[in-house]
Amino acid sequence: PLTAPAARGASAVAHPNIALIKYWGKRDEQLMLPVTDSLSMTLDVFPTTTHVRLDQDAAEDRAALNGEEATGETLRRITAFLDLVRARAGSSVRAVVDTRNTVPTGAGLASSASGFAALATAAAAAYGLRLDAAGLSRLARRGSGSASRSVFSSFALWHAGTGTGEEGDTSSYAEPVPAADSLDAALVIAVVNAGEKAVSSREAMRRTVQTSPLYGPWAASSRDDLADMRSALVRGDLKAVGEIAERNALGMHATMLAARPAVRYLSPATVTVLDRVLKLRQDGVLAYATMDAGPNVKVLCRRADAADVADAVRDAAGTVVTARPGPGARLLAEGV
Ligand code: 2P0
């Protein structure tokens, strides 16, 4: 019909990020407000590309992940996110979402970070929301906390924010953090197991905050880690960056091991890779490990050492991929 507006759409790309200071625990699950600040490196590998097209005639949102129709919890999360965008845009029009991931989903390889950063960027454009980078980061946070950081390139700090309700929502977003140009960082990703995890990070965080006696002490020490990390990045001190990142990640895993019942993402192959990292250090190679909500290990090292680090861990891992600091979320096309 002549009255129907033209179909509106947009596509965007975003990359995963790996936290050097971890986000673990929410103080508000509805608004996705974290307990602590976190700090990450956006990667230059495993992009997610997402297209959002408004469909005037549709009664429900539809989504496809790598060509497969989304259902259940996955579709519910995407619809809930689009509802937020629609509420801000004053729209009730449904959308068709097509998303392509190059990283295994739900394996602790940050697929929800790149996924919701790309969805936020594309959906904001498709629904005509004009957001600055901080606004986009706040919006992406509502899809998945870690997505707030993937809006930015290289190193990003996600502020936990203060207060509750609107004050909390407004004050919790990510922004770029300065790092010395001389900082020479690569991340060797040892994919020990690309299968989907048994306990979602959302459930694991909840259980940790509610039951782990180690949670409070870790959150307190994480504040010190963050301050130390910021100054190490500015100095371009890769050794300090690695030491701080490794202790912060091991501490996070300690909090979940102490939860009741325990959450253990680390597998025998994870520990084998950790042994190799220790051996590399004994041999004089700067190499430090960090692990997220899964058994995979990401090894921070100098670019020139990445090939040696990859060789050292290859027999313990299925796949090894080397990443460097990568780009922020970006709109690819609008109006299509
Ligand atoms: C992080 N992780 O800082 C931490 C470290 C996993 C371990 O952010 O519930 O998918 O969607 O906000 O962001 C993974 O949790 O969780 C995560 P929700 P998310 O990268």
Image (cartoon, rainbow, N blue to C red):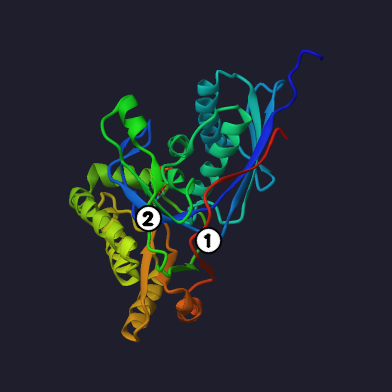
Residue that badge 1 annotates: 194
Report whether 117 appears left or right of 156: right
Identify the residue at image location x=27%, y=54%: 226
Cα separation between marks 2 and 1? 32 Å
The outermost residue toward the top is 3
Q: Marks 2 and 1: which is nearer the front? A: 2
Note whether residue 52 is visible.
no
Q: Badge 2: few (under 14), some or many (20 or more) residues near its Cα, within 10 Å? A: some
Residue that badge 2 annotates: 178
Q: From the Cβ of disc 2, is ligand 1 less than 8 Å away?
A: no
* Figure check: 249 above or below 79: below
Q: Position of residue 59 (x, y in %)?
A: 66, 21
Residue 99 appears in which quarter of the rendering? top right
Residue 264 appears in which quarter of the rendering? bottom left
Tell which circle, 2 or 1, labels the residue nearer the N-terminal end. Answer: 2
Three-letter amino acid code of the residue under disc 2? Pro
Three-letter amino acid code of the residue under disc 1? Ala
